[in-house]
Amino acid sequence: MDRTLSLDEKASSPITVDLGDRSYPIHIGRGQLSKVDFGRYIKGQKALIVTNETIAPIYLDMVVSQIPNKTIDVIILPDGEQFKNLDTLNLIFTKLLEQQHDRTTTLIALGGGVVGDMTGFAAASYQRGVSFVQIPTTLLAQVDSSVGGKTGVNHALGKNMLGAFHQPSAVVIDLNTLASLPERQFSAGMTEVIKYGLIADYQFMQWLESNVESLLNRDEAALTYAIERSCINKATIVSADETEQGVRAILNLGHTFGHAIETSQQYKGLLHGEAVSVGIVMAAEMSVLAGHLSMSDVDRIKAILNSFALPLKAPAEMTSSKFLSLMYRDKKVLDGSLRLVLLKSLGEAYMSDDFSLEWLHSTLNNSCRT
């Protein structure tokens, strides 16, 4: 990457996702919910806050209080990946229509990745496109899904198969929201943090390996640095390739394998970050077969994932045939050709459809019991 941070160096605040006249800021820090002037990102007189039943009791009033002189409507959705579907999305549309929101409205996503993805898709679709703001409250959403404009919902046959690219007007990351985040959700978010080191930032991976304990303890300096550096990596890649025609594809390291697991479990089993953790190990093992990584490299990857109690093997019910069936429905399949993100080295990823099916079958068999 062309921009790095040392631990004693603060990122410029805010970080900018550079997309010309659609560029937007990422505000990061403690207390951002009470510091950011949300009104500046609301074009008209009305806004709809989309949140869920877990987050609403904790942070909703605080956000509403930061938006004076606007008409604020609220919709509270059920919490969970299994609700990231068209039926739930339609609840947002119904609320917008019932309250007579027009093209000047702004949607505000207050929650994790599920809320952010659905709110963004609703914003992309409602009256052919309205503004929205991301307020991610989970680590995974803060470092990944809230940045970059990927929005969408799941289908029973595939994850995130329905959606649109639609950039937010701003992303507001308040580290205080992580205080209410369960350990399992925190660890799942660390998968995406680790991913940035693996795909494009070896120096960051080395730092992560040396700071596991500080991150597990949610040390403020370490956590701030990890989030900032992750966002800088994501912003740099998105700025270079907004709609995933090239380099942005490397952000999907482990995701094709992971999405297959999530779809198989009907989005009720492993969390997204947990499923991607398994997928990263599988991608690393395929990279060994491709002649790029060593087994010691794979051991390093497993060690850092394991340090955050992340899974390294596929769930018991996953079989090689089930993986293959679901992977070939993935968005990264083009003209019937499966493409996977592999690693040339630790810190350098690439997208390829030029791999031996024997490597794939060997990798699947190694991770599956049957």
Image: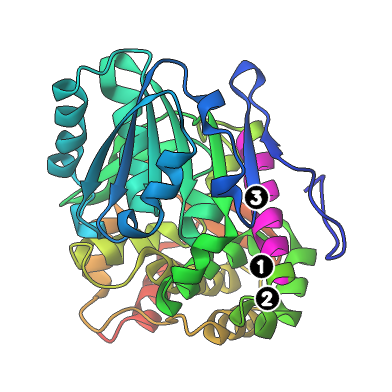
Amino acid type, residue under disc 1 in the picture = Leu
Residue 245 spot, x, y in % from top left: 53, 32
Query: What is the distance, in whole Å, between disc 3 and disc 1 at their CAs?
Result: 11 Å
**Considering the numbered disc 1 on the image, is that residue within a helix, a strand or a loop?**
helix
Give the amino acid type for the residue marked by disc 2 in the picture. Answer: Asp
Q: Position of residue 97 (x, y in %)?
A: 17, 21
Pick the residue in front: 226 or 71: 71
Query: SS at mark 2?
Result: loop
Q: Is residue 168 left or right of residue 31?
A: left
The residue that disc 3 covers is 28
Give me the residue at 53% from left, 75% from top: 285
Mark 3: secondary structure: strand
Q: Residues within 10 Å of mark 1 (few under 14, many from 20)?
A: some
Lower sequence index among marks 3 and 1: 3
Q: Mark 2 points at which residue?
A: 219
Q: Vertical placement of 344 versus 144: above or below?
A: below
Kindly tell me whether residue 198 is visible in this rendering: yes
Counting residues from the start of the chain, the first of labels 3 and 2 encountered is: 3
Q: What stretch is highlighted in magenta?
A: 222-238
Query: In the rendering, at what x and y percent does residue 331 appear?
Result: 35, 43
Residue at image position (61%, 76%) is: 218
Residue of label 1: 223
Q: Does the magenta stretch include residue 225?
A: yes
